[in-house]
């Protein structure tokens, strides 16, 4: 199909309402998913819940390869497949669901800037810890990443992934950083977010936006995931307003719906409480 | 190429024979102006005293001993010529000589018998390393193919070939090592190491395989057998963003480790335009038993029978069939299932465009059969007879087949029922061109019948090439 035809199809399907059987795909929650993927998946789930769009979470060992961009999570809505938070936000907007419509241009620019900050600092730090910290890579990332595969493919794929991330780290100048420096970066990012949030319930006061979903996804995952050391968790925990923010979103968007329908797949992992 | 020279000899009683092989004997006997006697040689008893092979470089002598030893059994001149000719064919088949010439001469020297003959094979070895280079354009992709071949690496007809293709989109390579058993060329071992990439637009699927395989070929009575183990890392992906979700779900990496056995009997006189004879090939593959993610048992067969009719026309009937049984409760992979349809299988249908599909992407089936009936005739009025025209045939065909998935809870009767329901068939006529002795091109006018919903048809003119054909 040509690009024009593809665009045409996406235009046509954009008019369709959000279907009941929309599905979000992510790697196996128990044995396979890694910190960064878990955070991204949780951010998308939080966003869709904020938009009140129902989605079923489906775990597949090959989710990464099923995704059109090679990144998880992705949603399958009707006959469309969209991956990652940014394009999913665009996609829901085309269907008439948006959280940032109430913002003015300056606020929207600010939101985008903070989202970039989270992606550049928190996501990159997560990738760094997963694949560039020797202990984490050997004890957690490689065994989990390769768990669905049989020998010798498990080793090949895990090392291939590790090399790929390390190349990326070299390209963006993170390869020379020490673990302490990365923790410090995370801390600084949290500091900035904490200051921006202040005492408001959400980043742009009363209404949550995609920035809230993204921050929640990353911070909640950092707070609830067991790594080789607790240092990162303690760093995030020290920002009490961010901790309260995570609790607030968890309570308002995840707990009631979980009680309401158990059939709706939910894979947020452990709770903060 | 080869020439057989016979020179006169003195008819004298037989003596003991010298069985020694002197392949290294570099003395060429050239008695140009010998007194010629006219004799009738056919019935004369002769003794082959020496068989020499000249022009050997790195080839080991023991290998050739097996190939030429039969020449010593010849009892008369005609026999010597026949056996030398066979030996020459055997030497050429090894694939290590560019040229083999046979010189038959009277024995010479101190121990020469009056009716003794010396047979000399004058060989030219292939170069130690041959290479090829070509470029290919097609499929929205350009590529450069580099081939390196080392015939006779270790001097016993071992062959090492390496092919590397560097494309704008994909690179692929293959390294293969072939080793025949000395004196038994049909019994051989092949080791392969490869990476290949295939794009299958009918399934919107892209497949990259990296694998190693070991193959053991051997003849048994009148049949040929191949035992093979293959370990392959398969990476499947969508060819386009618009690929159906059923194909998308199959994306990712799998490891297949499979043992397979192929038995074939081929009594045909030619692989492409056979005039007589039959071919039966039965193949079975067991995957998963030796590791890997894919586990299944796959059986398939191919049968072709040819019969010559009047005016050089040939009636040919073929039947294919196969079944894939997934083992261990895991569904079969899109890469392992069977596909049917196309210009060299069930004609009149699109390439592999029969059977189960999802949003226009064909997913293949777990069981299939296909049958064909052809009447091949020479071109009308036979232009270019005995030359170029013999590369062509006209044919009239009737093809039929079916492909479906089987639910293995239903029992064998239900399966048979499923395969005879909704049969796709087609008929038509066309022209076939033989390409070497391995492939053929077909230009047909087809009328597809029994079309089921979802099948892609090619009503009218269809063009295609194939190595395997129904």
Image (tube, helix red, strand yellow):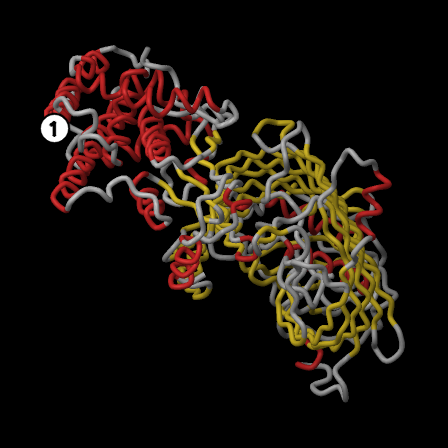
Measured along the vertical axis of the image, is residue B417 above or below residue A197?
below
**Label 1 Cα crowd, 10 Å radius (few <14 / some 14-19 / many 20+):** some
**Image location (x, y in percent) of residue A220:** 29, 21
In depth, the one of B12 and A165 nearer the eye is: A165
- Left or right: residue B290 versus residue B325 is left
Above or below residue B206? Residue B101 is below
Q: Quadrant of residue B459?
A: bottom right
- What is the number of callouts on the image? 1
Identify the image quadrant of residue B229: top right
Q: Is residue B338 left or right of residue A158?
A: right
Q: Mark 1 sits on what residue?
A: A196
Observer-nearest of B155 and B261? B261
Name the residue rendered at 54%, 60% in the picture.
B124
- At 73% from the left edge and 47% from the top edge, which residue is drawn? B18
Find residue A78 and report its horizontal and vertical position in percent.
49, 47
Determine which quarter of the picture holds residue B308.
bottom right
Q: Tell which of B127 and A136 is nearer to you.
A: A136
* Residue B153: x %, y % from top left: 50, 45
Report whether B85 appears left or right of B294: right
Quadrant in the picture for the N terminus of chain B: bottom right
In the visual, does B38 lie left or right of B126?
Answer: right
Q: Is residue B68 visible?
A: yes
Image quadrant where one finds the C terminus of chain B:
bottom right
Q: What residue is shown at x 62% (from left), y 43% (from top)?
A: B336
Residue B88 appears in the rendering = no
Residue A175 % position (x, y)? 18, 29
Q: Secondary structure at mark 1?
A: helix
Q: Compared with residue B343, is residue B332 higher up or lower down, i.e. above or below?
A: above
Marked residue chain, label 1: A
């Amino acid at each position: 199909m040509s690009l024009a035809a593809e665009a045409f199809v996406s235009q046509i399907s954009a008019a369709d309402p959000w279907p009941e059987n929309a599905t979000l795909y992510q790697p196996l929650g128990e044995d396979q998913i890694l910190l960064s993927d878990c955070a991204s998946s949780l951010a998308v789930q939080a966003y869709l819940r904020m938009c009140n769009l129902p989605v079923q979470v489906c775990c597949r060992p090959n989710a990464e390869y099923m995704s059109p961009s090679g990144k998880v999570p992705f949603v399958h809505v009707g006959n469309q497949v969209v991956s990652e938070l940014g394009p999913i936000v665009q996609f829901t907007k085309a269907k008439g669901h948006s959280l940032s419509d109430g913002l003015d241009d300056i606020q929207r620019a600010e939101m985008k800037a903070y989202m970039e900050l989270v992606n550049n600092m928190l996501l990159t730090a997560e990738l760094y810890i997963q694949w560039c910290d020797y202990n984490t890579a050997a004890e957690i990332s490689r065994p989990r990443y390769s768990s669905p595969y049989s020998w010798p493919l498990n080793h090949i794929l895990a090392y291939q992934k590790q090399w790929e991330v390390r190349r990326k780290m070299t390209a963006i100048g993170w390869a020379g950083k020490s673990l302490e420096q990365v923790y410090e970066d995370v801390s600084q990012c949290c500091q900035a977010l904490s200051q921006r949030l202040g005492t408001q319930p959400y980043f742009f006061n009363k209404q949550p936006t995609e920035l809230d979903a993204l921050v929640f996804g990353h911070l909640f995952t950092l707070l609830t995931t067991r790594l080789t050391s607790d240092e990162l968790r303690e760093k995030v925990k020290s920002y009490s307003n961010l901790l309260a923010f995570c609790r607030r979103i968890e309570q308002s968007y995840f707990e009631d719906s979980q009680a309401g329908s158990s059939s709706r797949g939910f894979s947020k992992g452990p709770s903060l409480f | 190429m080869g020439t057989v020279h016979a020179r006169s000899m003195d008819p004298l009683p037989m003596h003991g024979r010298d069985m020694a092989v002197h392949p290294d004997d570099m003395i060429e006997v050239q008695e140009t102006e010998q007194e010629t006697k006219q004799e009738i040689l056919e019935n004369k008893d002769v003794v082959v005293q020496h068989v020499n092979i000249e022009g050997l470089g790195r080839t080991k002598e023991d290998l050739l001993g097996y190939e030429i030893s039969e020449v010593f059994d010849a009892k008369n001149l005609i026999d010597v010529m026949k056996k030398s000719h066979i030996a020459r064919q055997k030497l050429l088949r090894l694939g290590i000589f560019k040229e083999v010439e046979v010189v038959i001469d009277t024995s010479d020297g101190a121990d020469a018998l009056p009716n003794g003959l010396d047979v000399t094979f004058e060989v030219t070895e292939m170069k130690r390393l041959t290479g090829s280079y070509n470029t290919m354009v097609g499929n929205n992709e350009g590529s450069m193919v580099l081939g390196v071949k080392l015939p006779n690496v270790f001097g016993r007809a071992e062959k090492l070939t390496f092919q590397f293709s560097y494309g704008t989109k994909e690179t692929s390579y293959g390294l293969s090592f072939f080793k025949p058993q000395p004196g038994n060329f049909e019994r051989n071992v092949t080791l392969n190491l490869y990476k290949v990439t295939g794009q299958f637009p009918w399934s919107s699927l892209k497949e990259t395989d990296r694998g190693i395989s070991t193959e053991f070929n051997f003849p048994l009575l009148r049949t040929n057998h191949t035992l093979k183990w293959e370990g392959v890392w398969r990476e499947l992906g969508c060819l386009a963003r618009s690929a159906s979700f059923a194909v998308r779900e199959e994306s990712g990496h799998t490891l297949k480790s499979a043992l397979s056995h192929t038995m074939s009997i081929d009594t045909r006189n030619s692989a492409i335009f056979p005039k007589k004879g039959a071919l039966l090939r039965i193949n079975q593959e067991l995957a998963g038993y030796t590791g890997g993610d894919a586990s299944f048992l796959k059986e398939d067969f191919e049968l072709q029978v040819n019969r010559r009719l009047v005016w050089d026309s040939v009636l040919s009937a073929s039947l294919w069939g196969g079944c894939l049984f997934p083992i261990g409760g895991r569904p079969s992979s899109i890469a392992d299932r069977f596909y049917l349809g196309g210009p060299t299988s069930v004609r009149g249908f699109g390439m592999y465009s029969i059977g189960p599909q999802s949003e226009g992407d064909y997913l293949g089936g777990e069981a299939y059969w296909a049958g064909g009936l052809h009447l091949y005739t020479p071109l009308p009025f036979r232009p270019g007879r005995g030359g170029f025209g013999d590369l062509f045939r006209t044919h009239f065909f009737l093809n039929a087949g079916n492909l479906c998935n089987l639910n293995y809870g239903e029992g064998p009767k239900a399966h048979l029922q499923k395969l005879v329901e909704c049969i796709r068939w087609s008929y038509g006529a066309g022209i076939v061109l033989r390409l070497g002795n391995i492939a053929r091109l077909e230009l047909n006018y087809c009328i597809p019948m029994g079309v089921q919903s979802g099948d892609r048809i090619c009503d009218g003119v269809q063009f295609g090439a194939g190595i395997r054909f129904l």
